[in-house]
Image (cartoon, helix red, strand yellow):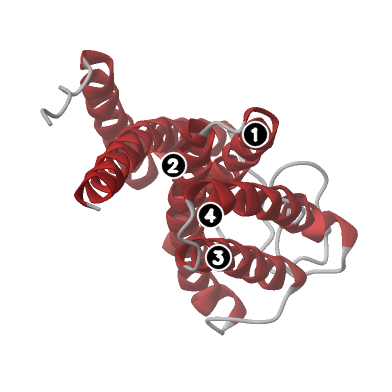
Amino acid sequence: MKPEKTPRALIFLDFLALLALATAFALVIFYAPFELTMGSVQKVFYFHVAAGLAGMLGFFVATIAAVACLKTGSLKWDVAGLAGVEIGMVLMALCIVSGSIWARPVWNTWWTWDPRLTTALIMELIYAAYLLLRSGLDDARRRAKLAAVYAVVGFISVPLTFFSIRVFRTIHPVMIGSADSSANGLFAMNPSMQTTFFSSLAAFSILFIALYWHRYRLGNLQAEINERRAALQEEGE
């Protein structure tokens, strides 16, 4: 089986993602000002929030793919859903780790059971269970159906995480929308901070699309290999 060549559009997207990340990094280091209260550690915020939102985008894409899989029964959508979950989990893990780096000097602890942190961790564990569910099922169609149902139900954790700092009393700052003045570590963005933030968000969004495309192509190749292997086993019998 001859592997397909990488599409030129994907190669261009890879370079664009690298360029966008390099630009965002340069803006964070050299352009964004130091926040008066938190100092240099505040700069973690730009990648922390961007990675988290891109991770949630992955879970949203997985949910759309799950609905399409249940509706059509096509295993292509199952591959698309798995790709969204895996990329989303990696980006959310980066969000959680970078958040802990920010929290240590600001909150004087690496971790606290704040509503936002707790719901984010639960969300990550829910999607880790999604992968465990898949690994325990051998039948491809049954696995696709059960995983799709789980992905749809599991998506409830995403808006719960996003809105947790707006619904519950929390020390986590709210950066989008009105903020609770009691939040420990709260700061307002000036124009240069906003430019840096949206540049980082764009960079991580492009990175997500590039990684997702690669993972989807890899998933389709793996599915084709499994189909051919099953066909050869049937012929051998």
Residue identified by numbered label 4: 35
Give the amino acid type for the residue marked by disc 1 in the picture: Ile
From the image, tell me which residue sits under label 3.
Answer: 133
Counting the numbered discs, the total is 4
Q: Callout 2: 10 Å neighbours few (<14), some, many (20+)?
A: many
Position of 206 with respect to 57 (left or right) is left
Tell me residue 167's x, y (percent): 89, 58
Look at the numbered discs 1 and 3 and tell me whether their residues touch, using CB distance below 8 Å.
no
The quadrant where residue 58 appears: top right
- Please identify, in this view, whether the residue under mark 2 or under mark 3 is nearer the observer: 3
Q: Nearer the viewer, residue 128 or 67?
A: 67
Q: Residue furthest top?
A: 8
Q: Which residue is under mark 1?
A: 64
Q: Secondary structure at mark 2?
A: loop
Label placed on residue 25: none
Residue 27 on image: x %, y % = 36, 37
Residue 32 badge: 2
Which image quarter is the N terminus in?
top left
Closer to the eye: label 1 or 3: 3
Q: Residue at x 23, y 44 (%)?
A: 235
Side of 17 relative to 44 (left or right): left
Whether residue 34 can be seen here = no
Q: CA distance from mark 2 to mark 3?
A: 43 Å
